[in-house]
Amino acid sequence: MAEVVIKPYHALPCSLETFTINGMDADESDFGDGCDRGSENAEDYACGDWTFESRMPSQQILDKYKISLQEYSEIADQLVTELCVGSCGWCV
């Protein structure tokens, strides 16, 4: 299994302070995208329902991090768990 470190910022839980795979800096956008699914229910600069949605990888991404499809899936699931913060007002 790949060695993965995922640490969101304390005051910005939708963004990562640390994200490494096998000691290499990683880019969360290689695994998916974050978006607010409930912006109409939040005040300006706040989120109504911040989520992270993973996507299927290209072979280039698997090669970049030297991981298998199974490892990619496990990392993407971890990002979904960490980055789906729901309603948030930290940016207000």
Image: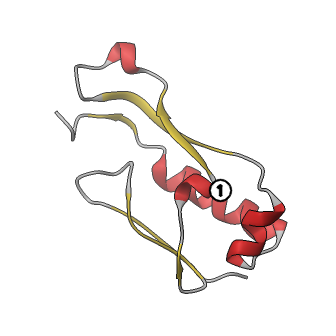
- Give how far across and how far down residue 26 sits, in percent: 54, 70
Image x and y of residue 48, in percent: 37, 25
Instruction: Report which quarter residue 52 is drawn in.
Output: top right
| Three-letter amino acid code at the position of disc 1 | Asp
Relative image position of residue 79 (x, y in whole percent): 56, 56
- The quadrant in which the C terminus is found is top left
Residue 3 locus on image (x, y percent): 61, 83
In depth, the one of 30 and 7 nearer the eye is: 30
Dividing the picture into quadrants, the one containing residue 62 is bottom right
Count of picture labels = 1
- Above or below residue 35? Residue 5 is below
Q: Is residue 36 above or below residue 72?
A: above
Give the residue drawn at x 49%, y 25%. Answer: 37
Instruction: Name the side, left or right, on which 19 lies relative to 13.
Output: right
Residue 92 or residue 24, whichever sits in front: 24
Q: Label 1, on which residue?
A: 77
Badge 1 marks a residue whose secondary structure is: helix
Q: Residue at x 73, y 82 (%)?
A: 1
Residue at image coords 38%, 20%: 39
Q: Is residue 18 above or below residue 41?
A: below
Could you tell whether 83 is left or right of 91 in the image?
Answer: right
Q: Residue furthest top?
A: 40
Check disc 1: other Cα within 10 Å, few if <14, some if 14-19, many if 20+.
some
At 30% from the left and 20% from the top, the residue drawn is 42
Q: Residue furthest left?
A: 92
Side (left or right) of 52 relative to 31: left
* Colouring used for the render: secondary structure
Q: Which residue is outermost to the bottom? A: 23
Q: Is residue 3 above or below residue 92?
A: below
